[in-house]
Amino acid sequence: MLNWAISFLVLALVAAFFGFGGIAAESAYFAKILFFLFIVLFLVSFLTGRSRPAA
């Protein structure tokens, strides 16, 4: 999922460089959503993994 966020970020930067405002804005928006979703899922998996007893 982090790969998707980085891909949309790169697409937004390239589109912004060439002046495609709508595409850049949408790509940046999707990159932001995917990045925060990745962070939330990472924290949830980190906290649930730490709460389990060692096998």
Image (tube, grey):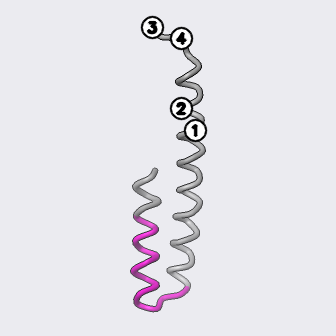
Q: Secondary structure at mark 1?
A: helix
Q: Which mark is residue 55?
A: 3
Q: Mark 4 or 1 closer to N-term?
A: 1
Q: Mark 1 or 3 closer to N-term?
A: 1
Q: Position of residue 50 (x, y in %)?
A: 54, 23
Is 18 drawn above or below residue 43 in the view shown? below
Q: Rate crowding at label 3 as few (under 14), some (14 to 19) or many (20 or more) other CA atoms within 10 Å.
A: few
Q: What is the spatial separation of the Cα atoms under label 2 and label 3, in whole angstroms? A: 17 Å
The residues colored magenta run 7-21
Q: Residue furthest top?
A: 55
The majority secondary structure of the magenta stretch comes to helix
Mark 1 vs 2: CB contact within 8 A: yes
Identify residue type, mark 3: Ala
Is 49 drawn above or below residue 29 in the view shown? above
Q: Residue at x 53, y 56 (%)?
A: 35
Q: Which mark is residue 46?
A: 2
Identify residue type, mark 4: Pro
Q: Which residue is mark 4?
A: 53
Q: Secondary structure at mark 4?
A: loop
Q: What is the spatial separation of the Cα atoms under label 4 and label 2, in whole angstroms? A: 13 Å
Q: Secondary structure at mark 2?
A: helix
Mark 4 vs 3: CB contact within 8 A: yes
Q: Is residue 9 magenta-colored?
A: yes
Mark 2 vs 3: CB contact within 8 A: no
Q: Position of residue 1 (x, y in %)?
A: 46, 50
Q: Rate crowding at label 2 as few (under 14), some (14 to 19) or many (20 or more) other CA atoms within 10 Å.
A: few
Q: Position of residue 47 (x, y in %)?
A: 59, 29
Identify residue type, mark 1: Leu
